[in-house]
Amino acid sequence: MIQVFVFYLFATLVIASGVMTIASRNPVHSVLWLILAFFNAAGLFLLIGAEFLAFLLVIVYVGAVAVLFLFVVMMLDVDFAALRAGFANYLFPGLLLAAALLAEMVAALLAHGAGAINLGGRAAPAGAEVSNIQALGRMLYTDYLFIFEAAGLVLLVAMVGAIVLTRRKRSDVRPQNVSAQVRRRPKDAVINMQPGVGEGMKL
């Protein structure tokens, strides 16, 4: 019974957090709603017995969202003085949200201890001798290998695009001309001088 209640709770919060992520005008608020959606999605993974995916979602994706938050702060003109001035106003809502997340984690652990949720026979659980990580690895690198590689390619393109978008041209820095450096010969860089006795070097 507790599994069903926790499932509907997490599912409702995932949908609500996703809607608020899109509807929020402030990009910082959108990132915070996205973090809440990731936490609730991790709880859903924990309910179906996919512990590895649940912790991977929290560790990797929430960490990636923290990096995304850092990029947003770097790319936008954010007034840090105004943010620090309003810290006291957001202290109580922040503590309330942290308490709600802690309560959700406790409920997820209690529901997971009561057993995985029944999906009506639509799932194909692995045997008891196969761990969750082994089953996931076999599925990714056998049945879904090309889709897994395509996802990695999409992430690579996104990373290159982020680097191109954040790259700025600076006029006070001398650019490096690699082709000119490769074409340069020793005779162009070294000059043999034979100064007379008592004469200085003339450049």
Image: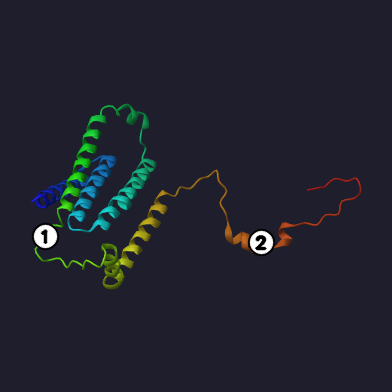
Dot 2 lies on which element?
loop
| Residue 165 drawn at (x, y percent) | 39, 51
Q: Residue at 57% x, 48% y: name it.
A: 174
Residue carrying label 1: 118
Q: Nearer the viewer, mark 1 or mark 2?
A: 1
Q: Quadrant of residue 29?
A: top left
Marked residue nearer the N-terminal end (1 or 2): 1
Q: Residue at 13% x, 57% y: name it.
A: 117
> Where residue 184 is drawn, which disc sits there?
2
Q: Is residue 48 above or below residue 74?
A: below
Marks 1 and 2, Cα distance to the nearest angstrom? 71 Å
Q: Residue at 24% x, 56% y: name it.
A: 51
Residue type at tag 1: Asn
| Residue 84 drawn at (x, y percent) | 34, 29
Left or right of 127, for residue 162: right
User: What crowding class fits label 2: few (fewer than 14 Cα within 10 Å), some (14-19), or many (20 or more)?
Assistant: few
Number of residue marks: 2
Q: Which of 128 and 8 is in front in this view?
A: 128
Q: Which of 56 and 12 is in front in this view?
A: 56
Q: Residue at 37% x, 37% y: name it.
A: 77
Q: In which quarter of the image is residue 56?
A: bottom left
Dot 1 lies on which element?
loop
Q: Which of 33 and 72 is in front in this view?
A: 33
> Where residue 96 is drawn, which disc sits there?
none
Residue type at tag 2: Arg
Q: Residue furthest bottom?
A: 142
| Residue 168 drawn at (x, y percent) | 45, 47
